[in-house]
């Protein structure tokens, strides 16, 4: 007798995704389209798995998945769209491959792992209502996520959809589209007339994303003190400085042609120590600094290129705003400087609200003058990354030095399994800033160092690149801070310069410094293992001092575990 199929009914968040214009893409270039589909599906599958979802059906370019949480389903959809939008930037518009995504909560029937029912059908219809590269959700999902995710939603109203007897009330998720603009936030339909044209002009023109749209920056603080000042306060301070400085008048543009750039990207950990305050407006100089695109901190090289191409040559009135994690926006061709400042901050803040990083936008430039309220982030000397097979080892969040357990938990969840290119910058007080899913190694490294330096108030170091520790991270002993021989009080004053010199010369392997009761140093240099360096430093110290102890391994001060 044939075994009876077991049907299981349940409530689930249903996710439906389909590539817009897939048939045309295949017809134009089948091999290239199929190759890219496989690569994009790896991204989609990875995000779904990490969000706790399960793919229950696929057909060609379509993906159907279930999630136990509507919040995780929407967050996953945003991550997917942001990540794939960055990949699409490498292709001309007619060859870009973008998903539409629909999400609903519904009663479904599970049969042999597949899901059936109205919930699946409605998700598919919502996907059809979504913008290219966008997300459309049902009212049930909106009710679940509206106060839990820092994104905005546009009420599309009740929509008649195929093969569903009752209208489906839909909401559009506000997010960047393939051209960098935002989906309109008005109910059902587009704005018309002059108002619509003005809005379109205010958000178009060449938005570029830094590091990766799927990149996220994660912050973890030891103190509750905010790392950045309120954006409005910073803007007011910038305005005050501008009003005290003469600026040469510039002609208005013939017509407004605003341009915007934005990116989501990286993340510090414990807050700056009191002895290392973040830069403040009081540290700024009275000299007017002229805007130079290649000197703008925090943003990606793509954004710098866009600024050099679109912002720098543009006439008055224009402004550029950014956050330390590179979310940014610029506008040009505004009716006045005041309008430019307001528009740049508003667009930047809108992008920041949709990112996972710091959300305080600050004016960086108004016209051709830099008005940033803080000094430039401190950076260490180059090279910023040195590869040494003797000291490199696989990254482990559990072995990350200086940071708290909550920071290690973040790295375990968000860094360890994330795609390359990724890096972690670390400050001496345990501040850390990391990003994942970048494109260029040098770009990722620079931006993490700049963001970490801005938080720590002092130069940070790159501890991990991709899945490898790229500095000697102590395991036998516990790292307690950064080691600076020239200022370490345990070392005799007349010996500090020699310690620094010998460490600079020891460019490979494990290095350890021990010191005795009288401050005489012992050296364990160029060791093949941490234990070798420790033993060498103690042995060398014991020949000239007593009660020797190891005070430094690699770039870190250390103590016994």
Image (cartoon, helix red, strand yellow):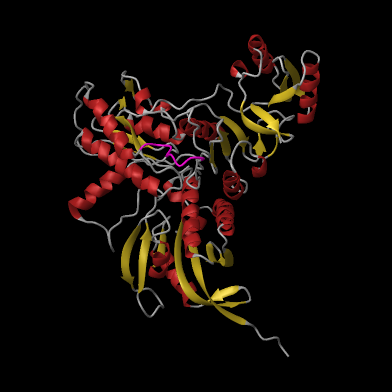
**Which residue sits furthest bottom?**
1
9 relative to 443, above or below: below
For image coordinates 80% across by 25% down, the residue present is: 535
For image coordinates 51% across by 25% down, the residue present is: 379
Please give left or right for residue 474 compared with residue 200 in the image: right
For image coordinates 54% across by 66% down, the residue present is: 65
175 relative to 548, above or below: below
Q: Is residue 130 visible?
A: yes
Magenta span dominant secondary structure: loop
Residue 183 locus on image (x, y percent): 34, 54
Instruction: For the N terminus, give its image quadrant.
Output: bottom right
**Which residue sits furthest top?**
494
Task: Tell me where the magenta segment starts and ends, as one range.
Answer: 222-229
Q: Nearer the viewer, residue 130 or 542?
A: 542
492 relative to 463, above or below: above
Q: Nearer the viewer, residue 452 or 464?
A: 452
């Amino acid at each position: 007798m044939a075994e009876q199929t077991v049907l299981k009914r349940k409530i689930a968040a249903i996710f439906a995704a389909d590539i817009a214009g897939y048939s045309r893409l295949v017809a134009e270039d089948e091999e290239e389209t199929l190759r890219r589909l496989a690569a994009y599906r790896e991204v989609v599958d990875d995000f779904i798995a990490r969000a706790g979802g399960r793919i229950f059906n696929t057909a060609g370019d379509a993906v159907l998945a279930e999630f136990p949480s509507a919040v995780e389903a929407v967050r996953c959809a945003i991550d997917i769209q942001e990540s794939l939008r960055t990949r699409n930037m490498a292709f001309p518009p007619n060859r870009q491959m973008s998903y539409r995504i629909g999400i609903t909560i519904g009663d479904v029937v599970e049969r042999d792992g597949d899901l059936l029912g109205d919930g699946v059908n409605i998700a598919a219809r919502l996907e059809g209502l979504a913008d290219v590269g966008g997300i459309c959700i049902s009212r049930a999902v909106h009710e679940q996520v509206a106060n839990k995710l820092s994104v905005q939603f546009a009420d599309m109203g009740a929509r008649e959809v195929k093969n569903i007897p009752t209208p489906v009330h839909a909401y559009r998720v506000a997010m960047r589209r393939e051209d960098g603009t935002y989906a309109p936030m008005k109910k059902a339909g587009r704005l018309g007339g002059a108002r619509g044209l003005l809005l379109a002009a205010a958000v178009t023109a060449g938005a570029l994303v830094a590091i990766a749209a799927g990149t996220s920056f994660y912050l973890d603080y030891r103190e509750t003190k905010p790392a950045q000042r309120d954006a409005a306060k910073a803007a007011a301070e910038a305005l005050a400085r501008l009003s005290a400085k003469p600026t040469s008048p510039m002609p208005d543009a013939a017509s407004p042609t605003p341009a915007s750039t934005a990116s989501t990207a990286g993340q510090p950990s414990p807050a700056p120590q009191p002895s290392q305050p973040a830069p403040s407006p009081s540290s700024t100089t009275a000299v007017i600094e002229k805007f130079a695109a290649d000197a703008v901190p925090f943003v990606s090289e793509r954004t710098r290129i866009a600024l050099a191409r679109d912002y720098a040559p543009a006439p008055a009135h224009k402004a550029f705003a950014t956050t330390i994690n590179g979310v940014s926006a610029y506008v040009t061709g505004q009716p006045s400087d005041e309008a430019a400042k307001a528009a740049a901050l508003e667009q930047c803040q809108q992008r920041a609200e949709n990112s996972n990083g710091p959300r305080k936008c600050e004016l960086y430039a108004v016209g051709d003058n830099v008005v940033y309220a803080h000094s430039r982030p401190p950076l260490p000397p180059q090279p910023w990354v040195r590869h040494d097979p003797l000291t490199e080892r696989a990254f482990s969040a559990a072995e990350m030095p200086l940071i708290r357990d909550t920071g290690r938990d973040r790295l375990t969840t968000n860094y360890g399994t994330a795609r390359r290119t990724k890096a972690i910058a670390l400050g001496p007080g345990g501040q850390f800033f990391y990003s994942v899913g970048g494109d260029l190694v040098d770009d990722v490294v620079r931006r993490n160092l700049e963001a970490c330096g801005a938080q720590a108030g002092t130069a940070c170091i790159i501890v991990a690149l991709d899945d490898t520790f790229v500095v000697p991270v102590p395991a036998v002993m516990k790292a307690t801070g950064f080691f600076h021989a020239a200022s370490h009080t345990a070392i005799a004053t007349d010996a500090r310069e020699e310690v620094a010199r010998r460490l600079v010369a020891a460019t490979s392997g494990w290095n350890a410094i021990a010191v005795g009761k009288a401050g005489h140093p012992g050296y364990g240099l160029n060791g093949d293992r941490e234990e070798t360096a420790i033993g060498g430093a103690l042995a060398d110290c014991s020949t000239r001092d007593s009660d020797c102890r190891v005070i430094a391994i690699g770039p870190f001060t250390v103590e016994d575990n």
